[in-house]
């Protein structure tokens, strides 16, 4: 029962074959059997979840229907503020912070009657690719608990993969939804920049951050985005136009579409199993009637460097607010400056400090042009490369990540090799475009492989259409083998 898709669960709730209370208890029960090993959650809200479930069941009984999330257990990444539930972004500096309001994405789910199971683990302030940078201990991959789940939204991906929630919310600045989804065998999507309000998302790099869903199916990803998307007066950067219809052509398949394989995103550095599953999937799309072409994104080799200047630069400004005065942790000192220094030195973990230092340096007088200014030029070039590629193809495809889930601890001492995990996902953030990861198989070690579909801004419909075709052609149905033991 804890492994329904959102659409199946919604249907079952409506035909009376299941109650929200049963779904919620099943998810919480799964959590109680797996959390000691997986640590997907930082906070589980048993009481709140059961209350919401009972309220949803009462609504169904009274004939009220507020939308597809009514009665559905959803896990929220802990960098999204939740009223009355501790929100830490996995940082000591926020430990004990209980927000007085809900972020808009959370509020939109609640408005439909969603059941919030709890807050999921992440790399501190969403900085990382393995969920090992959490101040509260790592999350582990349900496919193999010696492996990382990816990151930074590793907790939400694991909750969905292990059945302790039906849907998860994540945030994606450089791949943090798609890469953990790929490593955990579930679907993760990053919408077009601005399509989902970031009000109440603890900011990492504001020109890159987006909130998006982690789900078990592409259909569920569409339903989630329909719920989340739309202008929000509380987020001036949110998109003001009409939200496009994400379902145009959804089940039409790929006949007549041109699919661009990104030349730079294969070969050296890509694991053989990943590459093979990717090629197999492209062949299936071709057999299903798509025209497959090769496209080039020449600036790709410098996009990672540009990201690791732009994101730290923005984070150095965004994290200035954690000063010991307004939120969470505070170490007193004889002067304000010493209080702030003591608080920040102790409250931030090593990766966050590394990024603040890098970003502050990149923005400092005398270096700005050489670093930040240059990175912005590369960003413009990435955007132009994508524009040129979309003249040749409707969507672009690549593996979601160069490897499958790596061993816990294997990259923590080498930031650069960790950063390389995002080589395939970062370009879409730099361009502000949507992209989705769909599971397409397992490698020889039995670890999941993700296939990424990228589309131009506001091109979610064609992205979902291709992702749906991939899902149908591949029919990936495996689940973490340990689920049998944990059920
Ligand atoms: N792994 C990337 C980073 O560390 C992306 C993180 C994210 O998308 N939040 O910056």
Image (tube, helix red, strand yellow):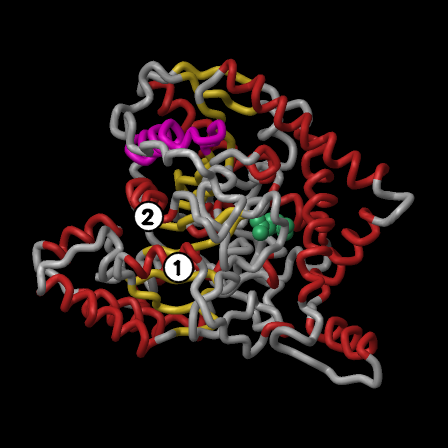
Instruction: Judge left or right: residue 199 versus residue 108.
Output: right
Please tell me how crowded label 1 is: few (under 14), some (14-19), or many (20+) other residues with Cα within 10 Å: many
| The residue stretch that appears in magenta | 453-474
Seen at 32% across and 43% down, the residue is: 226
Seen at 56% across and 47% down, the residue is: 209
Quadrant of the image occupied by residue 37: bottom left
Q: Position of residue 225 (x, y in %)?
A: 36, 44
Residue 450 visible:
no
Separation of disc 2 and disc 1 at Cα? 10 Å
Seen at 42% across and 56% down, the residue is: 104
Q: Position of residue 402 (x, y in %)?
A: 57, 40
Q: Position of residue 182 (x, y in %)?
A: 46, 46
Residue 125 visible:
yes
Q: Position of residue 64 (x, y in %)?
A: 14, 58
Magenta span main SS: helix
Seen at 55% across and 45% down, the residue is: 175
Q: Quadrant of the C terminus?
A: bottom left
Instruction: Judge left or right: residue 181 versus residue 361.
Output: left
Question: Mark 2 sits on what residue?
Answer: 227
Instruction: Judge left or right: residue 150 versus residue 244.
Output: right
Q: Is residue 311 above or below residue 26?
A: above
Please tell me how crowded label 2 is: few (under 14), some (14-19), or many (20+) other residues with Cα within 10 Å: some
Nearer the observer, 177 or 287 = 177
- Lower position in the chain sequence, tag 2 or tag 1: 1
Question: Mark 1 sits on what residue?
Answer: 106
């Amino acid at each position: 029962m804890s492994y329904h898709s959102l659409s199946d669960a919604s249907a079952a709730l409506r035909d009376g074959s299941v109650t929200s209370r049963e779904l919620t208890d099943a998810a919480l029960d799964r959590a109680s059997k797996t959390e000691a090993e997986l640590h997907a959650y930082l906070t589980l809200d048993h009481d709140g979840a059961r209350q919401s479930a009972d309220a949803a069941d009462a609504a169904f009984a009274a004939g009220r229907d507020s939308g597809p999330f009514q009665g559905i257990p959803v896990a929220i990444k802990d960098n999204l503020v939740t009223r009355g539930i501790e929100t830490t972004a996995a940082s000591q500096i926020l430990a004990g912070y209980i927000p007085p309001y809900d972020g808009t994405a959370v509020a939109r789910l609640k408005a439909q009657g969603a059941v919030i199971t709890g807050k999921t683990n992440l790399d501190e302030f969403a900085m990382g690719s393995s969920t090992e940078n959490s101040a509260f201990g790592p999350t582990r991959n349900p496919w193999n608990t010696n492996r990382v789940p990816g990151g930074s939204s590793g907790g939400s991906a694991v909750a969905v993969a292990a059945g302790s929630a039906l849907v998860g919310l994540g945030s994606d600045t450089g791949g943090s939804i798609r890469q953990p989804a790929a490593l955990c065998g579930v679907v993760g999507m990053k919408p077009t920049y601005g399509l989902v309000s970031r009000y109440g998302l603890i900011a990492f790099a504001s020109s890159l951050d987006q909130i998006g869903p982690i789900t078990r199916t592409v259909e569920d990803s569409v339903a989630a985005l329909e719920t989340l998307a739309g202008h929000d007066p509380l987020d001036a950067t949110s998109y003001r136009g009409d939200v496009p219809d994400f379902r145009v052509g959804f089940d039409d398949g790929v006949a007549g579409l041109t699919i661009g394989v990104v030349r730079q995103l294969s070969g050296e550095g890509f694991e053989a199993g990943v590459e093979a599953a990717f090629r197999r999937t492209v062949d299936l799309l071709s057999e299903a009637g798509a025209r497959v072409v090769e496209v080039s994104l020449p600036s790709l080799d410098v996009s990672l460097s540009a990201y690791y200047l732009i994101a730290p630069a923005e984070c150095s400004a965004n994290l200035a607010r954690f000063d010991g005065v307004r939120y969470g942790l505070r170490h007193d000192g004889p002067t304000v400056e010493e209080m702030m220094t003591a608080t920040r030195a102790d409250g931030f973990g090593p990766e966050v400090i590394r990024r603040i230092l890098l970003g502050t340096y990149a923005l400092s007088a005398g270096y700005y042009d050489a670093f930040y200014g240059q990175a912005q030029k590369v960003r413009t070039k990435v955007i132009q490369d994508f524009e040129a590629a979309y003249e040749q193809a409707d969507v672009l495809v690549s593996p979601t990540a160069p490897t499958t889930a790596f061993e816990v601890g294997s990259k923590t001492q080498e930031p650069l090799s960790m950063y390389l995990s995002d080589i395939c996902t970062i370009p879409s953030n730099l361009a502000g475009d949507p992209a989705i990861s769909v599971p397409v198989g397992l490698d020889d070690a039995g670890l999941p492989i993700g296939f990424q579909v990228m589309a131009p801004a506001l091109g979610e419909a064609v992205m979902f259409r291709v992702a749906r075709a991939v899902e149908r052609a591949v029919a990936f149905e495996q689940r973490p083998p340990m689920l049998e033991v944990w059920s």
